[in-house]
Amino acid sequence: MAFIRTLLIILEAACSLALIGLVLLQKSKSEGLGLAFGGGGNDSLFGARAGNVLTKATVGIGILFLVNTLILGMLFAGSADESLMDRAETPAAAAPAAMPVEQPAVDIPIVPETPVVPAAE
């Protein structure tokens, strides 16, 4: 099962990188980044319908990405008994609260105030 999960995670990363590349290569109204990465040569490489080829590839890889994401979500949801938030709260809730330590009472002698008398000159 771990091999399948690893394979699906690698497929997820590859699909995401392919989607990023395909979106950047597509033509926009103002050419955008597609021209900067050599998108201008798509007409000669894929023919006159280069936009359709890139669009169909983007849709196909997008669907593969979404299906793969759903499968990964179901695989990882079945393996976790509790969420990460539950795991983080468990040690704090299980630890006993520290009781405040009472300080022993200290008897401080009360000294009556003595008036300050200026020294005689």
Image (cartoon, rainbow, N blue to C red):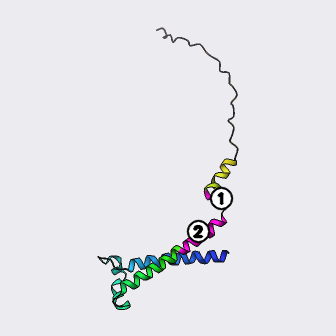
Q: Which of marks 1 and 2 precedes in the sequence?
A: 2
Q: Is residue 105 left or right of residue 45?
A: right
Residue 45 occupies quadrant: bottom left
Q: Secondary structure at mark 2?
A: helix
Check disc 1 and give the amino acid type: Glu
Q: On the image, numbered disc 1 is attached to which residue?
A: 82
Mark 1: few, some, or many residues within 10 Å (few <14, many ≥20)?
few
Q: Position of residue 91 (x, y in %)?
A: 67, 51
Task: Kindly identify which numbered label has been placed on residue 73.
Answer: 2
Q: Position of residue 32 (x, y in %)?
A: 33, 76
In the image shown, does 18 or 49 lie closer to the viewer? 49
| Secondary structure, magenta segment, majority class | helix
Q: Secondary structure at mark 1?
A: loop
Q: Position of residue 54 (x, y in %)?
A: 40, 83
Q: Residue at x 38, y 80 (%)?
A: 25
Which quarter of the image is occupied by the N terminus? bottom right
Q: CA distance from mark 2 to mark 1?
A: 15 Å
Q: Position of residue 60 (x, y in %)?
A: 47, 80
Q: Residue at x 69, y 47 (%)?
A: 95
Residue 54 shows in the view: yes
Check disc 2 and give the amino acid type: Gly
Mark 2: few, some, or many residues within 10 Å (few <14, many ≥20)?
few
* Residue 103 lies within the magenta run: no
Q: Which residues are magenta?
A: 67-84
